[in-house]
């Protein structure tokens, strides 16, 4: 660790904004996953002294060796060397809390098996920070994990009471949702607008100075914590609803002998039509998860979240719908129902990123396997341990052969640019299904593929 000798880590005071402007703050990031690690790197690049905390030995060991522990290749060349100035990686939340003015919590907020919000990570991370914060230090603790309105107060304030700490005296609590887009260099940590919620407007406005040094886009204080919490969750709810619409249309229009992409392209000629593209399902840790947080909160206050619930149901069932389409295509081609071999190109939920969280490839494959179809996958961004049991992992796509169907599940550049002609020649049955609507179906058909796509009438 390289830091100024004798540096006093104060937390919040009247000079906080000016110290933020000059970078004279130490910032701790609690949780170094897909959100926390880019956030830590961003604050260091902005000139702050950064402490990163994680409980995963794999992540800590990789960072201590200067390696990228995540599946986002954009980070490969951004990991600071272990002996870099203003960069300390530790497993100890207490150590980081003692050394930092600001603690930013970026832990997972998943849903349980019964689709209820799981706030255990938020609770345990907050408790660890508050226990180490002590009295009178006014450490600034900011939650960035996605939650529904009221979580920060209902989860963290009781812990403060239990520990005999007072907000505004011993600690300052705020919420600033992350918004960056992994794998998208134009919308990284340092290029997205931020909103900050805090019960104390003076503290909230001072935190604007902290985040203005981090990002080149707009940063604003939006009032109480619940406004900022709600902002984040409805951003992803809106996307889930929009995607659900085109996914439902992708089920309807082929039955009318219409290609959904033809219809969407025509509709997009109107100035106020917002174009979305259907797919095999919705993945990642945000869109398939966050609506359940809003649905839970709506239920608690007695308001039915009917539109949000319906959209989530459409997207959640899309892999099963696609499974039925794929089985119909195999049947038409004369492939035995219990003997088909299907190859997924890509497994991660998003192109160019090795992140398999909530990937729709998983339920789609499971639905095929339960009918007797075998599934293999090739994903250049994932290792074999990232793929579920029961899925055969292909190491060399140029040697893949004797499959009855290829499904483009993830539009990785490597999947798009492979030798499609050669793969077609090695197929047992050359059925192609574009699950992302990114391929030129006419060109694929000219190569010999029986080319189909999500939302298109089945031609073969």
Image (cartoon, rainbow, N blue to C red):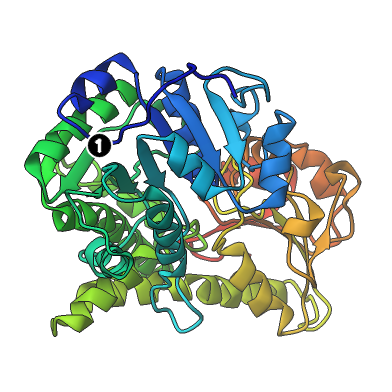
Which residue occupies 60% across, 50% down?
A: 355
Above or below, 356 relative to 28:
below
- Relative image position of residue 193 (x, y in whole percent): 25, 33
Q: Quadrant of the N terminus?
A: top right
333 lies above or below 169? below
In this picture, residue 120 sits left or right of residue 290: right
Q: Is residue 211 left or right of residue 421?
A: left
> For this rendering, which residue is in front, 304 or 161?
161
Give left or right: position of 246 versus 56.
left
The quadrant in which residue 146 appears is: bottom left
Residue highlighted by disc 1: 194
Q: Which residue is drawn at 19% across and 49% down?
A: 169
- Percent x, y of residue 4: 48, 16
Figure quadrant of the C terminus: bottom right
Label 1 crowding class (10 Å Cα cut-off): few <14, some 14-19, many 20+? many
Residue 107 in the image, given as x and y percentages of width and height: 46, 54
């Amino acid at each position: 660790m390289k830091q100024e000798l004798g540096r006093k880590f104060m937390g919040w005071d009247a000079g906080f904004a000016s110290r933020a402007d000059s970078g004279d703050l130490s910032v701790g990031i609690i949780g170094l996953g897909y959100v926390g690690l880019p956030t830590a790197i961003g604050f260091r690049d902005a000139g702050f002294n950064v402490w990163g905390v994680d409980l995963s030995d794999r992540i800590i060991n990789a960072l201590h060796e200067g390696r990228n522990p995540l599946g986002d290749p954009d980070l490969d060349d951004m990991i600071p060397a272990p002996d870099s100035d203003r960069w300390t990686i530790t497993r100890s939340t207490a150590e980081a809390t003692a050394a930092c003015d600001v603690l930013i919590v970026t832990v997972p907020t998943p849903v349980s098996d019964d689709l209820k919000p799981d706030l255990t990570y938020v609770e345990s991370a907050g408790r660890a920070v508050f226990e180490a914060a002590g009295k009178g230090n006014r450490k600034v603790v900011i939650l960035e994990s996605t939650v529904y309105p009221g979580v920060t107060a209902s989860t963290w304030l009781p812990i403060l009471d239990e520990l005999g700490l007072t907000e505004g005296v011993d600690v300052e609590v705020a919420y600033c949702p992350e918004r960056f887009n992994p794998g998208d260099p134009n919308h990284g940590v340092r290029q997205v607008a931020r909103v900050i919620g805090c019960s104390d407007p003076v503290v909230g406005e001072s935190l604007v100075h902290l985040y203005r040094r981090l990002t080149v886009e707009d940063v604003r204080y939006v009032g109480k914590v619940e406004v900022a919490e709600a902002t984040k969750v409805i951003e992803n709810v809106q996307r889930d609803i929009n995607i659900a619409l085109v996914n439902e249309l992708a089920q309807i229009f082929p039955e009318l002998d219409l290609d959904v992409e033809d219809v969407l392209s025509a509709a997009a000629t109107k100035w106020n039509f917002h174009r979305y593209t259907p797919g095999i399902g919705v993945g990642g840790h945000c869109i398939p998860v966050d609506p359940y947080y809003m649905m839970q909160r709506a239920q608690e206050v007695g308001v039915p979240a009917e539109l949000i619930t319906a959209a989530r149901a459409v997207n959640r069932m899309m892999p099963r719908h696609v499974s039925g389409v794929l089985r119909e295509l195999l049947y038409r081609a004369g492939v035995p129902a219990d003997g088909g071999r299907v190859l997924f190109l890509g497994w991660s939920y998003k192109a160019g990123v090795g992140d398999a969280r909530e990937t729709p490839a998983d339920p789609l494959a499971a639905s095929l396997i339960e009918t007797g179809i075998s599934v293999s996958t090739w994903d250049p961004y994932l290792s074999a341990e990232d793929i579920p049991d029961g899925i055969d992992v292909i190491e060399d796509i140029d040697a893949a052969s004797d499959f009855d169907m290829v499904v483009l599940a993830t539009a990785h550049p490597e999947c798009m640019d492979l030798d499609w002609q050669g793969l077609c020649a090695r197929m047992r049955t050359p059925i192609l299904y574009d699950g992302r609507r990114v391929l030129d179906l006419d060109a694929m058909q000219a190569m010999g593929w029986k080319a189909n796509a999500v939302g298109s009438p089945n031609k073969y």
